[in-house]
Amino acid sequence: MNSIDSETVQRKTFVSSVEWLDEVDSTNSHAINTITEREHFPLLVGANVQTSGRGRGGNQWWASAGSLPFSLVLAPSDYGLDQQQWPLMSLAVCLAIGEGLAPFVGSSTLQLKWPNDVYADGKKIAGILIETISTSLELVVIGIGINVNNLFPDAPVEVQNKACSVKDLTGESTSLENILISTLQSLEQTLQQFDSADSELLDRWRERCFLTGKQVGIDDSHRQSFGMCLGIDDDGALRLMTATGLQRFYAGTVISIDE
Ligand code: BTN
């Protein structure tokens, strides 16, 4: 139920090579530290157990047994994406995970919280950490953590009420391999659609936007701004109607949400 067969994953998805480890500190760190340009991409690095998962903003990513941590190393240029479009890539990955999880937990429960968290029933079910590799201008590491069979009543108190897993929602265990394959298939489709500048993709994102219509605070590392979220723009920027007018954010952290 919980093991991943590398050959099956390679056969059923677009990944060209797989490194699946028993245990690792962080799949992102492992990929960044061991990657060579000679690999075949996309390269999938995953682990049964991740002991020091990293989250956005230097946070830790809590993931006990039963969760699904993996990183995908690829060249965005293979999908027609240049560096200016990387904010859109982060939205694409988020959408792909949401849609890849839909068959397992029900589509209507899944929402996307800008810039790249996946929510189910109002709680975080998956997170994404996209990093670049200092020795390569070409490659990015897309780290994805999905809560599958880990139970949140067992988690540290600070995450207990904010996150959930597939098992919390369905009451039963789900094959990690099936979720991995579904997510990767969805990701391949989404990346290919970006290549053809498909605006329908952004509409699919908007349908699931968790923040639209809510009073939101954003910290973009220069300042904190507060206002009503108007959803995402065609270039992926988040639109916020503040007391001083419309502001757009390409990056940042959501620091508050009020209904
Ligand atoms: C976040 O929500 O803050 C992002 C969490 C990303 C976690 C994943 S798990 C696989 C990969 N390896 C890591 O160390 N982090 C990412």
Image (cartoon, helix red, strand yellow):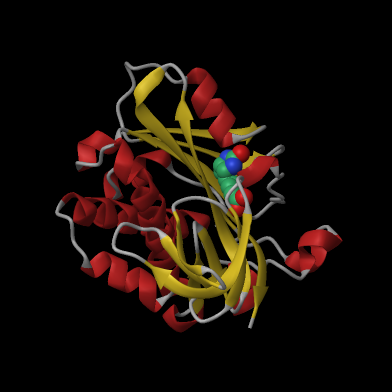
Residue 98 in percent (x, y) is at: 44, 66
Compare residues 229 and 18 and report the one nearer the observer. Answer: 229
Rendered image quadrant of residue 47: top right
Which residue is the extreme one toward the right? 157
Residue 103 in percent (x, y) is at: 41, 74
Compare residues 44 and 12 and report the one nearer the observer. Answer: 44
The residue depicted at 29 percent of the width and 37 percent of the height is 76
**Compared with residue 132, is residue 178 higher up or lower down, i.e. above or below?**
below
Q: Where is the C terminus found, in terms of image quarters?
A: bottom right
The residue depicted at 37 percent of the width and 69 percent of the height is 205
Q: Where is the N terminus found, in terms of image quarters?
A: bottom right
Rendered image quadrant of residue 256: bottom right
Which residue is the extreme one toward the front? 244
Disc count in the image? Answer: 0
Ligand 1 - quadrant of the structure image? top right
Residue 46 in percent (x, y) is at: 52, 39
**Compared with residue 181, is residue 242 higher up or lower down, i.e. above or below?**
below
Compare residues 159 and 22 and report the one nearer the observer. Answer: 159
Indicate left or right for 29 with 191 as reference. right
- Residue 210 seen: no
- Residue 92 seen: yes
The residue depicted at 60 percent of the width and 46 percent of the height is 222
